Image: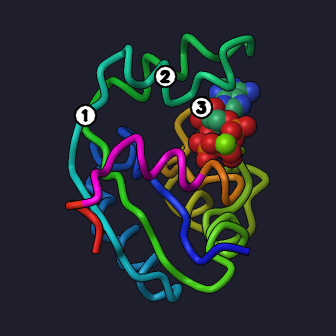
């Protein structure tokens, strides 16, 4: 069990002005921010980040969407961070997400689902390294 996870506030949520409310829910949920940036992925970078989904039918749509506007990327710390963060964000499809979860509150569809959360300790480390240098984490 690791105490860190990685998140992105996705382009649908940043463009609707939900970044502040989502960060507020994350912090009130007991996570502390160890690194954070406002940035925008190129198509190539989005494709690399979601490379595990390359063979899935929604890959092209996912890459287009994730490079369509700015995102907030962050490394978060809390005991049991990966599992607890997945609980806080809710199911991939917001229609199936529990009441009060970030995706239930802010996501419109399975494709445009407001936030990303790492699915394992190993991927949390890989994804954090994708965005942040040693000098950018505290
Ligand atoms: P994320 O990795 O973004 O936190 P997740 O782990 O809940 O989401 P994954 O199975 O890893 O879900 O899928 C990655 C992303 O691909 C989803 O968040 C969603 O944006 C998109 N996606 C997944 N399934 C579909 C689908 N059936 N149609 C369209 N987009 C999808
Ligand atoms: Mg995932």
Q: Nearer the viewer, residue 124 or 91?
A: 124
Q: Nearer the viewer, residue 45 or 29?
A: 45
Residue 111 bears which disc, if any?
3
Q: Ligand 2 sits in which quadrant?
A: top right
User: What residue sits 35% from the left and 39% below the top?
Assistant: 11
Disc tally is 3
Q: Mark 2 packing: few (<14 Cα in 10 Å), some, or many (20+)?
A: some
Q: Which residue is mark 1?
A: 40
Q: Is mark 3 within 8 Å of ligand 1?
A: yes
Please report contact status of discs 2 and 1: CB closer than 8 Å, yes or no: no
| Residue 38 drawn at (x, y percent) | 21, 50
Q: Which residues are magenta?
A: 124-134
The question of residue 79 being in magenta is answered with no
Q: Which residue is mark 2?
A: 48
Give residue 69's quadrant in the image: top left
Dividing the image into 4 quarters, which one contains the C terminus? bottom left
Q: CA distance from mark 2 to mark 1?
A: 14 Å
Q: Secondary structure at mark 3?
A: loop
User: What residue sits 59% from the left and 77% below the top?
Assistant: 3
Task: Work out which residue is located at the far front of the displayed protein and give it.
Answer: 134
């Amino acid at each position: 069990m690791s105490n860190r996870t990685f998140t992105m506030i996705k382009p649908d949520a940043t463009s609707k002005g939900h970044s502040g409310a989502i960060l507020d829910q994350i912090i009130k949920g007991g996570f502390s921010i160890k690194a954070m940036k406002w940035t925008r992925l190129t198509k190539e970078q989005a494709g690399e980040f979601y490379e595990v989904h390359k063979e899935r039918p929604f890959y092209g749509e996912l890459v287009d969407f994730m490079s369509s506007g700015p995102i907030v990327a962050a490394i978060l710390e809390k005991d049991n961070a990966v599992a607890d963060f997945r609980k806080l964000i809710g199911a991939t499809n917001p229609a199936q997400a529990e009441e009060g979860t970030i995706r239930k509150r802010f996501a419109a569809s399975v494709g445009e689902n407001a936030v990303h959360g790492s699915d394992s300790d190993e991927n949390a480390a890989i994804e954090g390294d994708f965005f942040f240098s040693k000098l950018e984490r505290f």
